[in-house]
Image (cartoon, grey):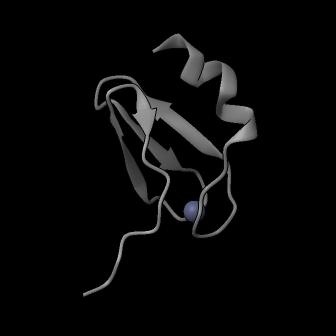
Amino acid sequence: MDWIEKYLNILQCPYCGGDLEYIKEKNQLICKSCKKTFDIVDGIPILLKKMKK
Ligand SMILES: [Zn+2]
């Protein structure tokens, strides 16, 4: 999972464009600005806006 930390600087929050932080314990990324969290599935961060139904 180390590559995620390397590439964090080129990833951004799809909602607000803010910086993301990797939370190892939860295996999630969190946006430093709007505090939304994104799951990491099979080593791939899911940085998609969730569809509203
Ligand atoms: Zn954000």
- For the residue pair 22 and 47, the one nearer the viewer reads as 47
Q: Quadrant of ligand 1?
A: bottom right
Image vertical order of residue 28 relative to residue 42, above or below: below
Q: Residue at x 39, y 25 (%)?
A: 43
Residue 21 lies in what quarter of the image?
top right
In-image side of 36 versus 14 (left or right): left
What x and y, as percent, mark residue 3? 58, 16
Q: Residue at x 61, y 60 (%)?
A: 33
Q: Residue at x 69, y 62 (%)?
A: 17
Direction left: furthest residue? 53
What x and y, as percent, mark residue 53? 24, 87
Q: Residue at x 59, y 21 (%)?
A: 5
Image vertical order of residue 2 relative to residue 20, above or below: above
In-image side of 36 versus 25 (left or right): right
What x and y, as percent, mark residue 46? 42, 47
Q: Quadrant of the N terminus?
A: top left
- For the residue pair 46 and 31, the one nearer the viewer reads as 46
Direction right: furthest residue? 10
Direction bottom: furthest residue? 53
Image vertical order of residue 38 relative to residue 15, above or below: above
What x and y, as percent, mark residue 9? 74, 34
- For the residue pair 3 and 23, the one nearer the viewer reads as 3
Direction top: furthest residue? 2
Total numbered labels: 0
